[in-house]
Image (tube, helix red, strand yellow):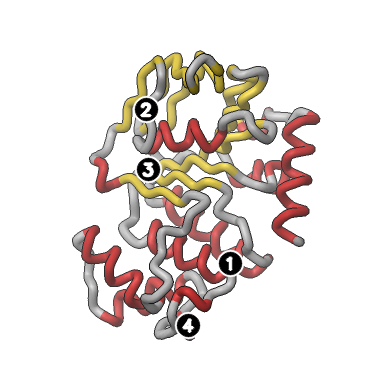
């Protein structure tokens, strides 16, 4: 087991976000985290990643902090640095190879090789997202948390994302993924945790999960926003 949650709850003051959420994630498994807009998916993802604390319950991550990767709504890239310089900074923090050849190879994987020497501040939203994905995948984390990583990606770039998730799964990583296209990405997941009515509406095999009306509506809204 790479990740375990036991009766996790989160309050903001007196306001309940969710309660009694439990799960186990093993090596080589991909978990889709689903729920209606405002259900607390991003909050739960941050708790799983160790970036926020639960109000109650227990979270266990069976890997060191440096083996955890996270992609959130912020890209965590520096606008005045080039794509290559951004990756060199993060590679140094991770203790990885900071040589140009290794960094260019990482950019090649996300289709940014030709933009290696351009300042990240000039990037489109999709390019910035791909650079953020390169940052997160570069150290090959054992636990990877992705909060709508497909935001701003066209079909070709989304294919890169799906390939990298599949590669992470194949090497034994555990992936927790909030997708803006739940119906389309169910086939790429092993498990689903659905937050419904401020609790667990479903936890089990992705193949057996049927999205509720609220989840389907949230997905349609997210896809429309990405395409706008």
Observer-side mark, 4 or 1, equals 1
Dot 4 or dot 1: first in sequence order is 4
Where's residue 167, x and y in %? Answer: 45, 56
For the N terminus, the image quarter is top left
> Would you place residue 73 above or below residue 130 in this image?
above
- Residue that numbered label 4 is attached to: 115
Dot 3 or dot 1: first in sequence order is 1
- Residue that numbered label 3 is attached to: 143
Viewer-nearest residue: 99 or 88: 88
Observer-side mark, 4 or 3, equals 4
> Would you place residue 205 above or below residue 184 in this image?
above
When asked about the image quadrant of residue 153, the answer is bottom right
- Residue that numbered label 2 is attached to: 53
Observer-side mark, 3 or 1, equals 1
Dot 4 or dot 3: first in sequence order is 4
The CA distance from mark 3 to mark 1 is: 25 Å
When asked about the image quadrant of residue 82, the answer is bottom left
Where's residue 202, x and y in %? Answer: 63, 22
Secondary structure of the residue carrying tag 3 is strand
Residue at position x 46%, y 71% from top? 109
Are the two marked residues, 2 and 4, in contact with CB atoms closer than 8 angstroms?
A: no
The crowding category of the residue bearing disc 1, from other C-alpha atoms within 10 Å (few below 14, some 14 to 19, many at least 20), is some
- Residue that numbered label 1 is attached to: 125
Dot 3 or dot 2: first in sequence order is 2
Viewer-nearest residue: 174 or 214: 214
Viewer-nearest residue: 118 or 170: 118
Secondary structure of the residue carrying tag 2 is loop
Secondary structure of the residue carrying tag 4 is helix
Residue at position x 53%, y 43% from top? 177
The CA distance from mark 3 to mark 2 is: 17 Å
């Amino acid at each position: 087991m790479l990740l375990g949650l036991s009766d996790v709850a989160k309050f903001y003051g007196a306001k309940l976000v969710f309660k009694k959420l439990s799960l186990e994630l093993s090596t080589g498994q991909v978990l889709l985290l689903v729920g209606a807009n405002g259900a607390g998916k991003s909050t739960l993802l941050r708790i799983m990643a160790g970036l926020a604390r639960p109000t109650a319950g227990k979270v266990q991550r069976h890997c060191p902090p440096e083996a955890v990767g996270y992609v959130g709504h912020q890209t965590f890239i520096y606008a005045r640095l080039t794509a290559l310089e951004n990756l060199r900074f993060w590679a140094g923090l991770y203790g990885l190879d900071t040589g140009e050849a290794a960094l260019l190879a990482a950019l090649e994987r996300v289709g940014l090789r030709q933009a290696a020497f351009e300042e990240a501040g000039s990037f489109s939203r999709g390019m910035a997202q791909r650079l953020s994905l390169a940052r997160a995948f570069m150290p090959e984390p054992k636990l990877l948390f992705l909060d709508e990583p497909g935001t701003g990606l066209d079909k070709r770039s989304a294919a890169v994302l799906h390939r990298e998730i599949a590669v992470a799964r194949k090497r034994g990583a555990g992936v927790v993924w909030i997708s803006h296209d739940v119906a389309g990405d169910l086939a790429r997941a092993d498990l689903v945790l659905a937050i419904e009515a401020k609790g667990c509406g479903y936890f089990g095999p992705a193949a057996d999960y049927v999205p509720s009306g609220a989840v389907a509506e949230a997905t349609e809204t997210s896809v429309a926003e990405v395409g706008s």
